[in-house]
Amino acid sequence: MSAITSTFRSLSEPRPNRGLPRSSNTGSHASSNTLKLYQFAGSPNSRRVRIFLAEKELGLTLVPADPGKGEQRWGAYRLINPRQMVPALVLEDGTAIGEVPAIWRYLEETYPTKPLLGATPKEKALVSMWERRAELEGFVAVMEGVRNNIPDLEGRAIADPHDYEPIPALVERSKLRVANFLSDLDARLADSPFVAGDQFSVADITALVTVDFAAKAFAISTPKEHRALTRWYEAVSARPSISA
Ligand SMILES: N[C@@H](CCC(=O)N[C@@H](CS)C(=O)NCC(=O)O)C(=O)O
């Protein structure tokens, strides 16, 4: 098992004993035998898509793709996604769509019931704005801390097609960024039931995955005085999709 796989496996395993759409036609409202989602259980980015699927009750085929080690990294998956990252959604004609927001967009437009990217132009813009802030200021900060904290990450300190060595000095700054993110999120949630407004959306998915990821990676838990964040976390954590 590679350092990436073992690290993410321990940091972001799905919660046990709850259903998730592992294969097609499993009690879902909509299902596709032709769409395949390549992903791995411990990957927080994969979890962002799995929660989305569970919220929309979409059954797709989930295909485990594991980085593996050395020359054999990713194996045949390299042909599917030459950027060597999960998740990737593969369509019937073989088109591979990478990047979580792009996968969400394809699925939302194909299966518009229960919109998670907003329903009106204003909602769509606000969901996009809040989700992007959650990703750039929260999720990316945790990921930066995690990846720069693993000495044997085989030049994979940044998840892109190039190799970069870790910079351990970034880890403390990442933790500070995460603490600031939690504080900013608390302030936002004091004014709004969900991150982007009155409805649960992808902004909540990214924020929730970030909070869980920070707790597992750095034992950064939500401070008690962040009451709005605590109220929101308890409410969204109780949704069945969150175990995905
Ligand atoms: N920007 C990408 C990020 C994907 C990503 O970082 N995936 C991680 C797993 S959470 C990965 O595949 N890492 C393997 C590697 O870096 O070698 C997205 O939105 O999908």
Image: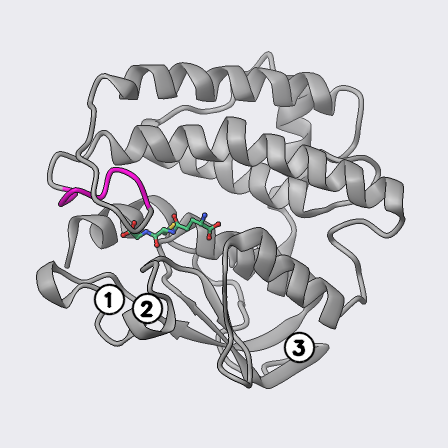
* Image side of residue 17 versus residue 237, left or right: left
Task: Report the residue marked by disc 2.
Answer: 65
Q: In this figure, which colouring scheme has been used for the structure? A: one colour
The residues colored magenta run 153-159
Tell whether label 2 touches label 1 (CB within 8 Å). Answer: yes
Q: Amino acid at mark 1?
A: Trp
- Please indicate, yes or no, whether residue 25 appears anywhere in the rendered image: no
Q: Which residue is mark 1?
A: 74
User: Which SS class for mark 2?
Assistant: loop
SS assignment at label 3: loop
N-term-proximal mark, 1 vs 3: 3
Residue found at x 42% / y 28% = 141
Residue depth check, mark 1 versus mark 3: number of the one nearer the observer: 1
Which amino acid, by three-letter code, is at mark 2?
Ala
If the image is split into quadrants, where does the N terminus sit?
bottom left
Left or right: residue 225 compared with residue 113: left
Q: Say if disc 2 is inside 8 Å of ligand 1.
A: no
Front: mark 1 or 2: 1
Q: Which residue is mark 3?
A: 28
Q: Kindly identify the residue that appears in the image at 74 percent across and 53 percent down.
A: 116
Q: Position of residue 122 (x, y in %)?
A: 87, 40
- State the residue in front, 142 or 239: 142
